[in-house]
Image (spheres, rainbow, N blue to C red):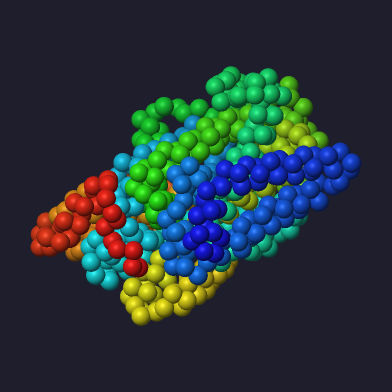
Amino acid sequence: MNTQAQGTRFVDKLGKVYGLYTLGFLAFFALMAVIEQFGVGARTIGVLFLLFTLAIYATIGWLSRTMQVEAYYVAGREVPALYNGMATAADWMSGASFVALAGGIYFGGYPYLGFVIGWTGGYVLVNALMAPYLRKFGCYTVPDFIGTRYGGNLARFCAVFILVVASFTYVTAQINATGTIAARALSIPFEIGVWFGLLGILLCSMLGGMRGVTWTQVAQYIVLIIAYLVPLIWMSNSQGFGIIPHFGYGEAAQRIQELEAQYGLQPAAEAVAGLRVLTTPHFDPQTSLDSWKFVTLALCMMAGTASLPHILMRYFTTPSVRQARKSVGWSLFFIFLLYFSAPALATLTKLQLLDPTLATAVVGKAVEDVMALEWVKNWSAVGMLSVVDQSGDGIVQLNEFFMRPDIVVLATPEIAGLPYVISGLVAAGGMAAAMSTADGLLLAIANALSHDLYYKIIDPQADTRRRLVVARVLLVGIGALAALVASLKLTGILGAVAWAFCFASSGLFFPLVLGIWWKRANRAGAIAGMIAGFVAGSLYLWHVYGAGPEAQLWSIDHLRFGMIGMPVSLVVMVVVSLITPAPDAETQAMVEETRIPTGKTVLAETH
């Protein structure tokens, strides 16, 4: 896999390679199920799952090692659409999607579907406005496009800065997820788990760059989608909703609504740090304010999806513009498989805990009986679950069962009473999801700093070896810093991800879109738009997060501050572009050529 010829042969036999890999993983899963029946402990099974999958990812990363610039930055531009779609889906199926999304729906109900709508709908924007044209442009990174399209180092530097802030915020959420999984599977403190997760992430991406990350992400997608669907189908079938619950779990949602009315949804009288309690209804009240929050959240997530550099980078790796467009379609299909399942998983898991007719229910049961449950003891031991009998009646009420939202998916097999091998499978899937996204994010940051900042601005004479050494050193340093920040638990996984999307959309969305679709957009307008949008959004986040919910304007909270940054960016960019000289004829011709779907790439392959 180190030479072009070897790479080409590998691409030609991808179906056979990943088919055998899938069969091998299923065989390993069956082996774990067998040894569980022979009395092997839960912790041993969890460790074996994580070590087995990490060993596979590390092996792929090692075999994909390269010292070729194009292979390191864009996987040699030889990734077929189907496999790029799988890799993109894995890149996208982050800790937020796999670990935290169902937890958000579990606690927040219908309004949290705004994440699903936004994250899926964003790919429509990617396909229609960006991916094919960025591939036609022929750049290596998003700041590479900004710097070349608008010209000058200042525009490139602004794009690098926004990319680093958004991607770093996002990657801390992924390392947070790996820490959560490792803490439970290995029975270690969360603060140590984040470093364990970082080690696995670096093994995949450090040596092979985008080539190693791509082939690893395909393998990771196979693991994570199996891990997500197996417990959902098993739990659904045991509850009587069939093996395809996606169309029939409405009855479960109705039952939850009845139980919520029966138990009552009072605010928690005593807060437990980092944990949440069921205090919101599962259904949307459908007031105008709720609808506004839903729409604005979805819009921020859509624009953020179309602005995040680690996603846009994936479409630089295809052989052609046509393949880039097709790979967006495959990306949507593979993402749909999980997103269509998340609401069903959240609903059925909540029913498991609320319905007194099910043996797994905890609400309405004696506190001592609930605390004696094995899964409750396990998650309580790592600080992610708590029962507080604040009423003093000895019975667990809705507002007395505290749980960290990020553990809902990971705890579902234990909540439903499934064999522990399913929990090991889910842990491996969650780790794959968080690692795949973290790989892409760390690579996006390191590549932008090494290619756009170091090579394009600081040392244009640097040879290939020095450039790739700088990229790898940055990869390790940024990863270590992200693990340190994640260990501080500044916000939950979903919150950190929402911030990343809003940072990206505030600063990059309109400079990217207008850079492709408006020839009149110029350097001064792009720089002003990036700075004004990013600063406006960031200041609003600081205002709301520092002053509390009462500081919100127009009911825009810290999850959707992109609704402040994006309009500012658009207005400032358009106004400044119109009052300053238009780009030269060569730049305008380059923009026109970028929009033509056929022909050679605009940039020569001499980065």
Q: Quadrant of residue 458?
A: bottom left
Could you say where residue 25 lies in the image, as x and y percent from the top left?
Answer: 70, 44
Q: With 287 as the anchor, is 41 left or right in this view?
A: right
Q: With 570 as the anchor, is 290 left or right in this view?
A: right
Q: With 488 as the anchor, is 147 left or right in this view?
A: left
Q: How many marks?
A: 0
The quadrant in which the N terminus is found is bottom right
Q: Residue at x 27, y 70 (%)?
A: 154
Q: Residue at x 29, y 63 (%)?
A: 604
Q: With 155 as the anchor, is 83 left or right in this view?
A: right
Could you say where residue 528 lies in the image, as x and y percent from the top left?
Answer: 23, 62
Whether 448 is drawn above or below 329: the answer is below
**Camera-side residue of 363 and 440:** 440
**Camera-side residue of 29 and 393:** 29
Could you say where residue 290 lies in the image, as x and y percent from the top left?
Answer: 40, 33
Looking at the image, which residue sits at the far right? 38
Res. 355 visible in picture? yes
Whether 291 is drawn above or below 75: the answer is above
The quadrant in which the C terminus is found is bottom left
**Camera-side residue of 19 and 245:** 19
**Camera-side residue of 229 and 28:** 28
Q: Residue at x 42, y 55 (%)?
A: 77
Could you say where residue 356 lies in the image, as x and y percent from the top left?
Answer: 72, 24
Q: Residue at x 23, y 47 (%)?
A: 596
Res. 446 visible in picture? no
